[in-house]
Amino acid sequence: MLSEYITNNQVYLRAFQQIAEKAQITDLENLWPAQQLQCLTDAGISALGIPEIYGGRLVTEQEMAHVYLDCTSACLTTSFVLSQRNAAVQRIVACQSEQLKQRLLPGLAAGEHFATVGISHLSSSGQHLGKPMVVARETELGYVLSGMVPWVTGAIHADLLVTGATLEDGRQILLAIETNTEGVELGKPVSMLSLTCSATGNMHLNEVFVPHENLVAGPVENVMKSGGGGTGSLTTSLIATGVARRAIRLLSEEADLREDLQTQSNQLIAEMTEVLNDLEIAQSDSACHQPELTPQNLRTRSNSLVLRASQAYLTAAKGRGFVLGHAAERTVRESMFFLVWSCPQPVAQAAMREFACSPNWQS
């Protein structure tokens, strides 16, 4: 049987156990995971990735990977919200403005403020429209932004938004915007197949003035290529694999009681172990020796694994797993999320090929 968590940090372990206890009711009642986020803060996880000078603690990529895997095993919503908050923090940490970092990072490290990102429109959402979804014009004192920011997680709960806009000459900027700024209009959260409790919705910017002091990156072309993260990053693969790990652990518990499930359970465990090992290699210095372990390759494999593992667990759970509130039905719904969240076109095409492939019924 697989262990539920990877961490041996007892503070983290208690936090993840508390988060797991709240996951089902959070999903069923579409509750913002405020208590789970507080658990992360109490465990010191909100400080991770922020330099000590601002009240944080820098960690290795491997330690952060374990946090995402264990948090996802406990509650995907909490892990997803954490990833969006960390994406905002990462951009601020990487910015050139010491003044901005001193002003924002201590409160974020202490969990006193919640930040999120709205950046999908710079790389994927709305790109087919042929014109920027958010435009900016520069003034003597800063920038004035207009447009709609799609897919902002926790928008109605956020104190700070890191988002981007396109200038008239095509260059892009990233800015930190306080959500109580005049002209910021928070849209109603969208009801979704899963993760409705993440309070993800649109944010409208109506002639919103942002001072130069809040500039995070740019003006440059393709601002999303600076600062790391973004579509297809390893974080999305880690979180997908975390859901797969939960499904496979639950399947292995069924297999301990049913011999007919053991072969398939062992096969999925072996595949998951290989994916996890390759994710760790991709984050290490040895990654240069295995250039085939690209973010696209790993995301394709983690997506395939989570979809198959969750459906295997539902099949093993039978009718009881189809009942609302069962771990199997929740895990299947959550697995669908990775087909649309930050999913690069090559990964989507690989999924379509797998869906369209005729199985060998003789095997």
Image: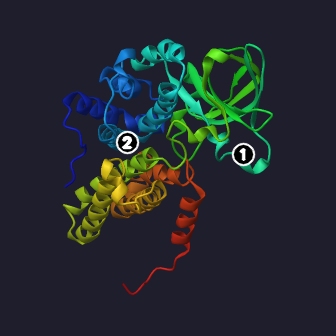
Q: Position of residue 116 (x, y in %)?
A: 54, 28
Q: Residues within 10 Å of mark 2 (few under 14, many from 20)?
A: many
**Residue sitting at 58 percent across and 65 percent down?**
349
Q: Secondary structure at mark 2?
A: helix
- On-image quarter of the N terminus: bottom left
Kind of residue at disc 1 = Gly
Residue 100 place in picture, x, y as percent: 54, 16
The residues tagged by marks 2 and 1 sit, at their Cα atoms, a distance apart of 28 Å
Q: Horizontal placement of 342 versus 261: left or right?
A: right
The disc placed on residue 126 is 1
Q: Residue at x 25, y 43 (%)?
A: 5
Quarter of the rendering occupied by the C terminus: bottom left
Q: Toward which corner of the image does residue 168 lie, by quadrant?
A: top right
Q: Is residue 334 left or right of residue 345?
A: left
Residue 358 x, y percent position in the rendering: 51, 80
Horizontal and vertical percent for residue 43?
A: 29, 24
Quadrant for residue 199, please give it.
top right
Q: Tell me the residue at 57%/21% (across/down).
A: 160
